Image: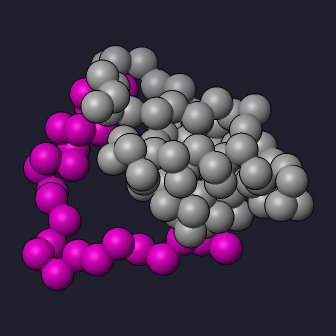
Amino acid sequence: TCPVDVLKVDKLFIDGVTGTAEQAAIATSLAHIAQVMRLRAVAEGVETADQAERLYQLGYRLAQGFHFAPPLSAGNIEQILDTRAESPAPESWERPALAG
């Protein structure tokens, strides 16, 4: 077994994910490796909706980057979490379609 549970994929490999097959090869391969090894893959540096959609298609379920939010202070994160805790998603909530 592998002594890790998360594979973080650097922005360098995410940048080309919407380009040619050659440009997307490493991100694609790492998604497959993570799936086979039962690891969670985190795509770092996601900047566009197109990247987010393609990464989701490849099997990435975790991502971070300016597409989702700018870097935040701990205080700002706490405030966001508190706000969300006060008004949780309704039971009928479904994953929204990715912007495109």
Q: Classify residue 14 by image quadrant.
A: top right
Color style of the picture: one colour
Q: Which residues are magenta?
A: 76-100
- Residue farthest to the top? 74
Q: Residue 31: tell me if it is visible.
A: yes
| Near-viewer residue (29 or 74) | 29
Task: Say which residue appears at 64% left-offset and 30% top-offset.
Answer: 10
- Residue farthest to the front? 1
Please state, as top left, top right, bottom left or bottom right, where the N terminus lies in the image: top left
Percent across and percent down for residue 78 are 25, 27
Percent across and percent down for residue 49 are 65, 61
Does residue 14 show up magenta in the picture? no
| Near-viewer residue (77 or 36) | 36
Q: Residue 69: tell me if it is visible.
A: no
Viewed as shown, does residue 42 lie left or right of 82? right
Q: Classify residue 46 by image quadrant.
A: top right
Percent across and percent down for residue 59 are 49, 61
| Near-viewer residue (16 or 45) | 16
Viewed as shown, does residue 20 lie left or right of 13? right
Viewed as shown, does residue 26 lie left or right of 31? right
- Residue farthest to the bottom? 92
Viewed as shown, does residue 23 lie left or right of 67? right
Q: How many marks?
A: 0
Q: Is residue 1 above or below residue 3?
A: below
| Near-viewer residue (8 or 2) | 2
Please state, as top left, top right, bottom left or bottom right, where the C terminus lies in the image: bottom right
Task: Say which residue appears at 33% left-offset and 47% top-offset.
Answer: 38
Task: Say which residue appears at 28% left-offset and 77% top-offset.
Answer: 94
Percent across and percent down for residue 52 are 60, 58
Q: Is residue 66 above or below residue 4?
A: below
Does residue 83 show up magenta in the picture? yes
Q: Is residue 54 above or below residue 61?
A: below
